[in-house]
Amino acid sequence: MNLDDLSTAVLDEVRRQAGADAAATVRAQQAALALTRFAGSAIHQNVADEQVTVHLELTVDGGRTATASTTRAAAVPDLVAATLAAARLRPRDAGWPGLAGAAPLLSPGSYDPTTAEASPAARAEAVAAFVEAAGGLETAGFVQTAALTTVLATTAGQHVRGATTSAICDGIARLAGADGVARAMAGRLADVSPAALGARAAAKARAGVDAAPVERGPWPVVLEPAAVADVIGGLVSGQFNGKAVVDGTSGLQLGSAQFDPAVTLADDPLAGVGLPFDTEGTPAGRTELVRDGVPVGLTTDRRTAAALGRTSSGHASDASATWGPVAGDPVLTAGAGGSVDELVAGLERGLLVSDFWYTRVVDPKRSVWTGLTRNGVWLVEDGRVVRPVSTLRFTQSYLEALAPGRVVVGSDVDPQPYRLMGPMGYNRVAVPALRLAAWNVTGTTTG
Amino acid sequence: MVNMAQDIPAAVGSAAFDAATAAVEAALAAGARYADARLVDRRHESLTARDGDVRSLSQTTSAGLGVRALVGSSWGFAALGDPAGDADARRTGARATAIAQASAAVPGPPMELVGVPAVQGGWASECREDPFAVPLAEKADLLTAVTATMRAAGVAVAEALSQAWDTRTAFVSSEGARIGQHVRETGAGMHCLTVGDGETQRRSYPAFRGQYGTRGWELVRELDLPGHADRIAAECQELLTAPQCPSGDTTLLLGGEQMSLQIHESVGHAIELDRILGWEAAFAGTSWLDLQQLGSLRFGSELMNITIDPTIPGALGSFGFDDEGTPATARDAVRDGVWVGVLAGRDSAAVAGLDYAGSVRADGYARLPMVRMTNVGLEPGPHTLDEMIAATDDGVLMEHNRSWSIDDRRLNFQFGCEIGWEVRKGRRGRMLKNPSYTGIGPRFWQSLDMLGGRAPGEWRAWGTPNCGKGQPGQVGHTGHGAAPARFAGVRVGVRG
């Protein structure tokens, strides 16, 4: 049974079991994910899985809702029966936002058949190119290809189909205790260059040997795109998230000059690798979040939108009931700061940081995060890199780091794979490098 | 201690074994020298309540086949949801071998697997009250009532959660293993938030994401959520006006729940053999531990005794067999402060020259089995929390995790807790807000100078239902025996 017929069959079963007044959203989703991992310059894990999953959200009596999913396409009557039984047990939710009405999509999605059908041999070839380009250094990383096709249908008349593909190459080169990283994500495997990434990772590793610590305290920094992706990921999940605003845990001040004027941020699923609609069926489009330093938008689903007196921005997801609606394809607009080298040239004394690791929020309201550097830090003096620095711990407010007068935005946007609870594991975060006036270093791996 | 094989549970049907067997046969026919297959049928239920109402009720069922094939020293893994019969199973088995053959294009060194007995048997977790047989209305009433209680006490947000899993696995290997397992897991918890001027505070019970075990609904009843709702709501409000945790080096006392995460992050992950061998170098990270020092390295003080024990009844990381078919066996990881053991799989152990495996697990049928924690816990010590407080002239007591972060070699950690108290001249004093501490793993563990567990209930096998690892991502369920402990000279009160 194809996905359209499957979703229609579920809606028919809902009407049969729950009656014409029941409200339901059905998603029939076909996912294929293949991922080839390498370590010690050899492929050590190589996986592929494919599955069809049916998701059902069913509401009866105008506000009694339950959700369920199954990988068993033949078990549709059981799925509906279990969901209906669960929904009838719930008290009526006066805040139930209702179903999204029928609305046209702005795009069918971005689907590349060649990427969807990429063979294990094609991924092995990409791994070999990364390994070869590292010039004999030990390497580790992964190459992933993924394809997702979704049909969403509701009892309110929405029936839409979207499809997307993505490809990631992400790896490190290692030399004498120093790791260098390079990663990229695109909608097509053909747009990822494993050889270029392997060469870049190797160059970084060679420049990172014999690292030594620096003192704790505030440091001016240049953050490369991998590190910037973490900052933007933290902000879109904790500050621009409509649930965080409803709960009072966001410190965002809409309409005020909270960020440097060089900061312009949006969520743009149509330019990324997202589906063209969210899990409630709301068409996805560009959501402006910060314009010239002023927060102007939030990401919402129907529930948080209703609580905030807005319309949904199309950010419902399987995780949004728990974690809130989060931007899936954030884009930080390029600035006038130039390349990473040009940003470094503007540092009198500071640090160049490749990547962050294990960042966790300490104070949600101020967006204070702690985490560590990874895959290389360098001391910069008089605009030049002078030596590598060992791993550092930071404890820093992301909001304050991007405050007015503290930011220079680089000119080259570099899409990074980053986990924002996307349906295929990784999201695409398109960001340039940043130069920031201060970053609070609170520890090293030696003390 | 070893979990003895039982009969295959009736819940694991023979058709599941037929599909797994067909997949293994097809993988071998396609050229694999070893293959195994798991047919996993899993049911999950999640119920959340917020501010006196049920907020979400989700039920998922997933069934599918995952097949591993070994060609030379190269692995392939293929998975298929809802296989329709022998043809689907055979296609998946052959695909696993084809993927392994592609892996061989970028091969590693020759590798054999550590031997395990080819068991034909099974295991089932103990479950006195089937969580799926408890009426949804009863669960909903429990969660809505405790959130209503907390809201009535004045907090801004009150949430509660219960979860249950029922997993039935049929495992077949080309070495003759045929194992059925039926594992039921249950857990619940609650938390509340208060919002002040530019700050939020949080309290939770019994742990920051609840308490979980390989048990039935009786675990939730024993938690007595209603008996703690008023208390955590009051503490959450009091935190808004409490003084900040001071900054500096001091004596640190940690409650058992925070100790469980300290063990998880700074010991459990550090002793994963795939990390130590560099197999996770690009993602999860490596380890500061060097295999050359296994058996001689001082990890902590003599009070530190860590076991890898998947046989603990009811603990979340317990099973009868891991996902390579290795029988559950208890081992030492740290004995009298010296590092003596690792979490290993059949391939990683062989590469490392070790003769044991048993810690390979997968998140459902669609994910590759990999080295994971089982129950990695600290044995109880000779003290009580009251004795630790009485013996402390100046220190801070912290409880319940709020944030956690550790570097990719598992050395430098920083934890935030929900609540703290001054300890002065042998007495617990004022409440402190925003307590946090930081340290370096082995230095921290060597500063362990008092360890609780002697008082009834102090030692407990805490469950962590959300351990992330692997690409594609996998969520692991792990257990951690822990008790309150005291550490000397720890840096606390790290500010941003």
Image (cartoon, coloured by chain):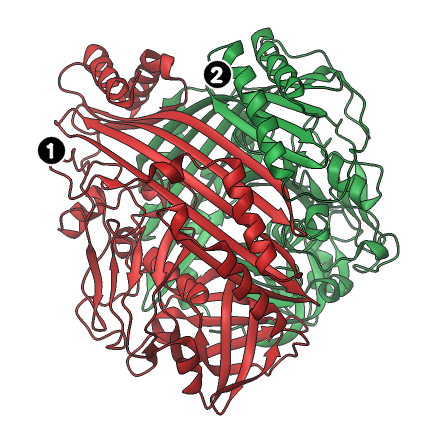
Chain colours: A red, B green
Residue shown at 73% from the left, 30% from the top? B311
What chain letter is assigned to the residue under label 1?
Answer: A
**Label disc, if present, on residue A102 of the rendered structure:** 1
| A22 relative position to B117: left or right | left
Mark 1–mark 2 distance (CA, rounded to whole Å): 34 Å
Q: How many numbered badges does the structure rendering display? A: 2
Which element is circle 1 on? loop
Residue shown at 31% from the left, 68% from the top? B197
| A109 relative position to A385: left or right | left
Report which residue position mark 2 lands on: B83
**Residue B117: image location, x then y, percent:** 81, 22
Q: Nearer the viewer, residue B26 or B133?
A: B26
Q: Please, is residue A38 above or below residue B220 in the view?
A: below
Which class describes the residues within 10 Å of circle 1: few (<14), some (14-19), or many (20+)?
some
In the picture, the quarter occupied by the C terminus of chain A is bottom right
Query: Tags 1 and 2 in contact by the CB under 8 Å rule?
Result: no
- Residue with the most extreme right position: B296
Q: Looking at numbered disc 1 in the image, what kind of residue is underneath it?
A: Ala
Does residue B412 appear in this view? yes
Q: Looking at numbered disc 2 in the image, what kind of residue is underneath it?
A: Pro
**Residue B382: image location, x then y, percent:** 80, 51
**Residue A377: image location, x then y, percent:** 55, 74
Marks 1 and 2 on same chain: no
Q: Nearer the viewer, residue A35 or B199?
A: A35
